[in-house]
Image (spheres, rainbow, N blue to C red):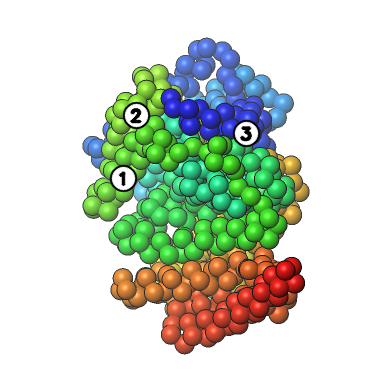
């Protein structure tokens, strides 16, 4: 290994948290990471066998095609539940090194729900609408297992919400007229959720059993080869020496990882354990350092090509080509990160913060020589996705190519033990999002059964009072509330089912509506009081959680502004415009986002008074809106700001001399 790479890794080890500290932080803010550390060999081997078996099943079916829909989703959900009960304790003071007899019993019951679907599949189909006693028993069992498994993995928030929806389905006739419905008995509710593909085995678990699992598995293989180190080293080489370099490293590396990794919280802890101490060392405050990492990690979910796997789900939900969604999301995604980097850069300039010395930084040439080949699987993935192959097939080949290409260098090579470990880690990483999807299936299933989605749409439209802006505002609030404490994929599924229809009914294009609710759903990770990504960043930095959350919202201001703009002007999503028009829109919007960052930070060339800050923010909003008239107004306002800043700087220079 070269000296430059060694020096970088020494710098990493010097500044980052220990593995034990990282694990504690992940477990504190991310319930999905609270695994048992099994110390009984046969139990550990059993979990490995089941995990590897499930991973191989999904890899094989990506080539051969899935099983019958209900069976495929049931097998995925049942095995996930088995692993959940073996790996997650029922409470904090439960055994942390072994599974209890009750856990094994619940795991066996979970397996029984799979067996029943396979053994009596034809009977289930033929009895549609007329469930037998066994149907009802296994349906009730599955609903209970999903709620308990979800409670252990995802936490109480989504579990309580799912339980409330079940009560809503049962108590319909006794509720206020606005939300009342005819009501359903327990048998009808649980059989609808278990024996159809509209409930637990609906779209949410369907995407978990296809796209999500394989892309999480792909991320596990990349992580095993050292892709995270490649992103960190590359970002260090590119921007580590600039003003506020470590913060820019955090933005760049977290953006790359966040697009592949569907968990913003895990991304904060993984990347932030290195970048946050470096930011603090170069002069950034605790709260600001944590906020930068949080905002950058959350933004990865809207960054093409993978978008945390949400792009594929959106494509299937809307019946749109994946390529069209990925291309349309480029400008908003880039604007989001430009906004974060702008504030980071201006904060560094304002406070005279320097970057790292050249001696502390790796050479890009050396970095690419050591680990650059790890980018090839990503290029293969992107080529196949844009070449018309299915995302499942492309992800499977990306995983296989990762193993093959890792062999090119000794530092990245995966042996059989490493492959098995990656298969197990990938399956473990998928447990949380799979359980969230299963519980989302309960919510969406009840909404479908009772018509709750239509009632929520009507409520948003009534509050909006036939005004698009108010309708957008209340849809934004609904999306943030629905997205609190959830991974990005379940967030999208819930918000697109519950909140997006209000915008569609108002006349907004479905794709634009779905992008709007998705943006605000993931921003729930930054909005107190339940800003889990910001809280994780504050935990690493030693900052104040709510303060960190509000700063991260300021950093993510582009993510708040841009969704409103592309509703009014879909050209920002390349809807109804060509390449030339898209480039022009992108350039003017980028200038607007820089002006927005300057206005929020209160600094451009020099300190800005409140008048210049208002002018700067106003010019930003006008510039981001596509159109010749708006561009002329925006540039005029911005020119005034720049002129006053230049005059102030010259006066300062003259005074100094």
Q: Is any part of residue 176 visible from this angle? A: no
* Marks 3 and 2, the one that precedes in the sequence: 3
Of circles 1 and 3, the one toward us is 3
Rendered residue at 34%/36% (across/down): 373
- The residue that disc 3 covers is 16
Position of 483 with respect to 49 (left or right) is: right
Q: Secondary structure at mark 3?
A: loop
Q: Position of residue 514 (x, y in %)?
A: 45, 64
How far, Cα to Cα, is label 1 from label 3?
30 Å
- The residue that disc 2 covers is 406
Total numbered circles: 3
Rendered residue at 58%/48% (across/down): 245
For residue 101, above or below residue 592: above
Query: Could you tell me which quadrant the C terminus lies in?
Result: bottom right
Q: Position of residue 73 (x, y in %)?
A: 38, 41
Within 10 angstroms of label 3, few (less than 14), some, or many (20 or more) residues? many
How far, Cα to Cα, is label 3 from label 2?
25 Å
Q: Position of residue 263 (x, y in %)?
A: 53, 44
- The residue that disc 1 covers is 379
Q: Position of residue 185 (x, y in %)?
A: 55, 52
Residue 647 versus residue 612: which sits nearer the camera? 647
């Amino acid at each position: 290994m070269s000296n430059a790479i060694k020096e970088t890794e020494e710098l990493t080890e010097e500044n980052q948290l220990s593995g034990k500290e990282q694990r504690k932080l992940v477990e504190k803010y991310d319930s999905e990471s609270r695994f048992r550390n099994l110390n009984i060999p046969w139990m550990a081997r059993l979990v490995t066998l089941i995990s590897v078996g499930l991973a191989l099943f999904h890899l094989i079916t990506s080539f051969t095609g899935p099983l019958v829909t209900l069976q495929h989703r049931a097998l995925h959900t049942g095995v996930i539940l088995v692993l959940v009960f073996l790996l997650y304790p029922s409470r904090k003071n439960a055994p942390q090194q072994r599974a209890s007899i009750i856990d094994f019993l619940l795991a066996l019951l979970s397996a029984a729900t799979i067996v029943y679907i396979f053994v009596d599949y034809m009977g289930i189909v033929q009895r549609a609408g007329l469930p037998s006693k066994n149907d009802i028993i296994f349906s009730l069992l599955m609903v209970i297992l999903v709620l308990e498994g979800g409670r252990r993995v995802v936490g109480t928030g989504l579990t309580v919400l799912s339980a409330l929806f079940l009560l809503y389905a049962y108590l319909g006739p006794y509720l206020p007229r606005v939300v009342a419905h005819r009501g359903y008995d327990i048998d009808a509710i649980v059989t609808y959720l278990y024996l159809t593909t509209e409930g637990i085995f609906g779209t949410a678990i369907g995407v978990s059993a296809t796209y999500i699992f394989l892309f999480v598995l792909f991320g596990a293989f990349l992580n095993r080869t050292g892709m995270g180190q490649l992103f960190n080293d590359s970002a260090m080489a590119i921007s580590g020496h600039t003003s506020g370099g470590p913060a820019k490293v955090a933005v760049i590396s977290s953006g790359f990882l966040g697009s592949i990794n569907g968990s913003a919280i895990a991304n904060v802890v993984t990347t932030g354990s290195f970048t946050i101490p470096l930011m603090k060392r170069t002069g950034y405050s605790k709260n600001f350092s944590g906020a930068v990492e949080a905002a950058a990690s959350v933004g990865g979910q809207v960054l093409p090509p993978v978008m945390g796997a949400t792009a594929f789900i959106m494509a299937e939900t809307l019946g749109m080509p994946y390529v069209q969604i990925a291309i349309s999301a480029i400008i908003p995604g880039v604007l989001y990160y430009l906004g974060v980097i702008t504030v980071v850069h201006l904060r560094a300039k304002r406070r005279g913060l320097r970057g790292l010395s050249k001696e502390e930084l790796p050479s890009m040439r050396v970095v690419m020589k050591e680990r650059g080949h790890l980018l090839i699987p990503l290029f293969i993935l992107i080529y196949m996705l844009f070449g018309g192959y299915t995302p499942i097939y492309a992800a499977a080949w990306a995983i296989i190519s990762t193993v093959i290409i890792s062999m090119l260098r000794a530092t990245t090579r995966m042996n059989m033990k490493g492959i098995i470990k990656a298969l197990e880690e990938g399956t473990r990483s998928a447990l949380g999002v799979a359980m969230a999807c299963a519980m989302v299936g309960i919510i969406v299933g009840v909404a479908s059964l009772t018509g709750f989605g239509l009632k929520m749409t009507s409520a948003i439209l009534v509050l909006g009072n036939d005004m698009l802006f108010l309708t957008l505002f209340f849809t934004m609030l609904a999306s943030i509330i629905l997205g609190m404490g959830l991974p990005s994929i379940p967030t999208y599924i819930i918000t697109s089912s519950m909140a997006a229809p209000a915008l569609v009914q108002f006349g907004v294009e479905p794709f634009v509506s779905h992008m709007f609710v998705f943006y605000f759903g993931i921003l729930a990770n930054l909005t107190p009081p339940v800003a889990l990504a910001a809280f994780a960043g504050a935990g690493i930095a030693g900052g104040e959680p709510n303060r960190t959350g509000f700063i991260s919202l300021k950093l993510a201001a582009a993510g708040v502004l841009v969704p409103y703009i592309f509703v009014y002007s879909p050209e920002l999503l390349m809807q109804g415009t060509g390449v030339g028009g898209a480039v022009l829109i992108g350039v003017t919007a980028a200038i607007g986002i820089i002006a927005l960052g300057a206005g929020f930070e209160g600094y451009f060339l020099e300190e800005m008074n409140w008048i210049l800050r208002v002018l700067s923010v106003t010019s930003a909003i006008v510039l981001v809106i596509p159109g010749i008239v708006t561009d002329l107004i925006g540039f005029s306002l911005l020119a005034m700001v720049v002129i006053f800043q230049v005059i102030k700087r010259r006066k300062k220079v003259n005074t100094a001399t």
